[in-house]
Amino acid sequence: MATRVVRFGVIGCGLMGREFASAAARWHHLVGLDFRPQIVAACDPEPAALKWFEEAVPGVRVASDWRRVLDDREVEAVYVAIPHHLHREVYVAAIDAGKHLLGEKPFGIDAAANAEILARAAAKPDVLVRCSSEFPFFPGMQRIVRAIREKRFGRILDVRSGLLHSSDLDPDKPINWKRVVATNGESGCMGDLGMHALHVPLRAGWFPADLRAVLTKIVTTRPDRSGSRVPCETWDNAVLACRVGRAQSDEFPMIVETKRISPGDVNTLYLEIAGTDLSMRFTTRRPRTIESLPYRRGEPQAWHVADLGYASAYPAITGAIFEFGFPDAILQMWAAFCDELVHGAAGMRQPFTCATPDETRQCHAIFAAALESQKTGATVKTGIW
Ligand SMILES: NC(=O)c1ccc[n+]([C@@H]2O[C@H](COP(=O)([O-])OP(=O)(O)OC[C@H]3O[C@@H](n4cnc5c(N)ncnc54)[C@H](O)[C@@H]3O)[C@@H](O)[C@H]2O)c1
């Protein structure tokens, strides 16, 4: 089988840039694919970040200016993982340069930046533009996605979804760009974590018509590099009570939580769906397990607990009895992006594509409504349709 090599440039060699380098390096973990990524160029203004890449990715061309990556004729696609205030300029330039783009969320620091990126993507239909979101590739989430596709839930009663972190509980955790409005965005924890909580509900078509948000700032100052305390401006926690659906006959409540300060939670994703025919719930706290409750009149209402193991969307060398984890979800997401790039959405090995530009627009509409709701105390329409 001939292997199609997709040559990538990485813009932003921090936490997530390194995750992609690691995924590309262990591509042989996946079996039976006729494509693979190769990182040929990388860019970051921080010399230490570039040094890591030079050591980890043999032969990579490095630069401190992202324009060098976009000018590189060998680069066919880029992965961009940089602070949010830079998304608009770099994503637009990448699309204009004709590079396929997997960009990190929130895909623009705010709704206006997001709209500009999407307008450029619409003008270049031959360029594949997708947003990073790896959690739907956990096997338990894939089971939920399949049940949604097969319409097995009956009438949806309610949905709860969230992404929860806890390390900001430490008031002396040093400040970084993610705690500053100018670099992270006014949406704070929602822009940072919201795509993870919303991706599968939005893919299901569960669009909030309106919402009431309660946003909280808990730690208001943090130490900088010199140890002096500086303002920590961004929202720490967000709870959104959403009304999903257009007509009373099909509407239901959806609670979306994105929290930086949730004691004990370490990147905990959860999704719980209650329906008249089937209920399902998954959390990365128990990454191998899916719970489901099929309802049959007259029969006991009992939760079924199944350990799925490594039942990945793209087959891998890992035995089915072993666990699946975060780096595996990243690897699967990369396979989906490359698969769609090489074969088109209709020709993919499995049907779940990475998050679309329109899904990033829907997220921003929800974040903007939540900010307005927090300000006014009112229920706010999202205008998502
Ligand atoms: N998908 C996920 O699970 C996930 C997790 C964390 C972060 N993210 C997203 O990834 C992106 C980056 O976050 P991170 O955690 O990797 O941050 P990070 O701070 O670890 O890395 C960002 C990198 O961008 C570099 N950078 C800054 N300005 C640059 C420029 N002009 N050109 C090129 N590089 C530049 C920085 O030097 C740094 O190395 C954000 O959009 C964030 O929301 C996604």
Image (cartoon, rainbow, N blue to C red):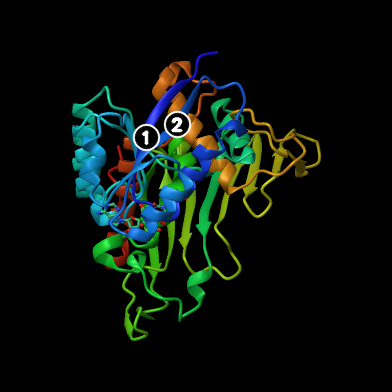
Picture residue at 36% right of the left edge, 68% below the top: 235
Q: Quadrant of residue 150?
A: top right
Where does the image place residue 151, in percent across and percent down from the top left? Answer: 57, 27
Q: Is residue 367 left or right of residue 66?
A: right
Q: Which mark is residue 197?
A: none
| Residue assigned mark 2 | 37
Pick whichever, 231 or 61, lies toward us: 61
Between 337 and 136, the residue placed more toward the observer is 337
**SS at mark 1 in the image:** strand
Quadrant location of the C terminus? top left
The response on whether ligand 1 sits within 8 Å of label 1 is no
**Residue 15 screen position, x and y as percent:** 44, 55
Residue at point 59%, 31% (across, down): 28
Which secondary structure, mark 2? Answer: strand
In-image side of 129 versus 253 (left or right) = left
Mark with earlier residue (2, 1): 1
Amino acid at pointer 2 = Pro
How many numbered discs? Answer: 2
Neighbor class of circle 1 (other Cα within 10 Å; few <14, some 14-19, many 20+) is many
Type of the residue with mark 1: Phe
Compared to residue 32, the image places residue 223 above or below, namely below
Work out whether residue 353 can be spotted: no
In this view of the protein, which residue sits in the foreground, 279 or 345?
A: 345
Q: Are marks 2 and 1 in contact (CB under 8 Å)?
A: yes
Query: Residue 360 is drawn in which quadrant?
Result: top left
Query: In which quadrant of the rendered view does residue 100 lie?
Result: top left
Residue denoted by label 1: 8
Image coordinates of residue 319 in percent, x first then y, are 74, 34
Q: Rounded to the nearest whole Å, what is the CA distance between mark 2 and mark 1?
A: 7 Å
Neighbourhood count class around disc 2 (C-alpha, 10 Å): few under 14, some 14–19, many 20 upward: many
